[in-house]
Image (tube, rainbow, N blue to C red):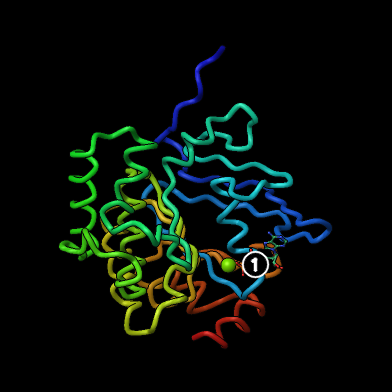
Amino acid sequence: MTAAPQPRTDVPAIQVRALHKYFGKNEVLKGIDFNVDQAEVVCVIGPSGSGKSTLLRCVNRLEEPTSGEILVEGIDICDPEVDLDGVRSRIGMVFQQFNLFPHLNVMKNLTLAQRTVKGRSKDEAVEIARRNLDKVGLAGKESAYPAHLSGGQQQRVAIARALSMDPDMMLFDECTSALDPELVGDVLAVMKDLASEGMTMMVVTHEMGFAREVGNKVVFMDGGVVVEEGLPDAVLGEPQHERTKAFLSKVL
Ligand code: ADP
Ligand code: MG
């Protein structure tokens, strides 16, 4: 038996080639190509139903690609022999709905997977959890239950939980879309900090200000294809395609 391929730092963090995804007869991704470089922040924008979530979910194989290639740190994640748990353990994901365990307090939310998946001791898991709670501005909330936190606090707990697994990259799927407007800023601030620390991030978002300020690249999707991608100022400020212009005229 050959050893499993090791993650590489000398290649893009994520490489997507000719990715197609069907749900039944519905072709939702129609040949997607793009890279996310290491330490790059790529913001994916586009109308509802354009395939953004499906694309993100293919990157850690929550969805099974129909065809095409996805390399994560150089590892082909569609290879039947791939160590999928290993790959997934290096990818943190934060969803629109916070997906915290409602019956566990904040500390237990942050330590559970550290204990079961990473095999960390309780003391180590607690220390790492504390560090990450502090990082998202929630030191002192260890014993709170999710229902007693605001949506913005819950989402920051979800980010702290993902960070506690030491991911090499983070995927965010409209993680501020369910929040009251006044709570969005705190979550975006945490994401901005992460970006400035060099975290590789793929961010599906409707927050054009964030995309412009924090993104290194913006990818505009519509109808299952990448219509346009480039520097945020270029894509958002001087879009080249009619579809991009039409979308931006509605959201900006
Ligand atoms: P977006 O995130 O851009 O709104 P999605 O990736 O969620 O788009 O959805 C793209 C298309 O795929 C939509 O038409 C949606 O109905 C369809 N779709 C998404 N998930 C499933 C699924 N599990 N089964 C069938 N169709 C799906
Ligand atoms: Mg979506």
Of all residues, the one furthest to the right in this rendering is: 25
In front: 137, or 226? Answer: 137
Of all residues, the one furthest to the front in this rendering is: 103
Please say if 62 is above or below 134.
above
| Ligand 2: image quarter | bottom right
Q: Residue at left 71%, top 68%?
A: 223
In front: 179, or 113? Answer: 113
Q: How many marks?
A: 1
Q: Residue at left 29%, top 46%?
A: 111
| Helix, strand or loop for disc 1 | strand
Q: Residue at left 53%, top 30%?
A: 83
- In-image side of 189 versus 13 (left or right): left
Please say if 201 is above or below 192.
above
Q: x, y (%) of residue 45?
A: 54, 70
Please say if 65 is above or below 214.
above
The local crowd at label 1, few if under 14, some if 14 to 19, many if 20 or more residues have their Cα within 10 Å, is some
Q: Quadrant of the N terminus?
A: top right
Q: x, y (%) of residue 25?
A: 84, 58
Mark 1 highlights which residue?
227
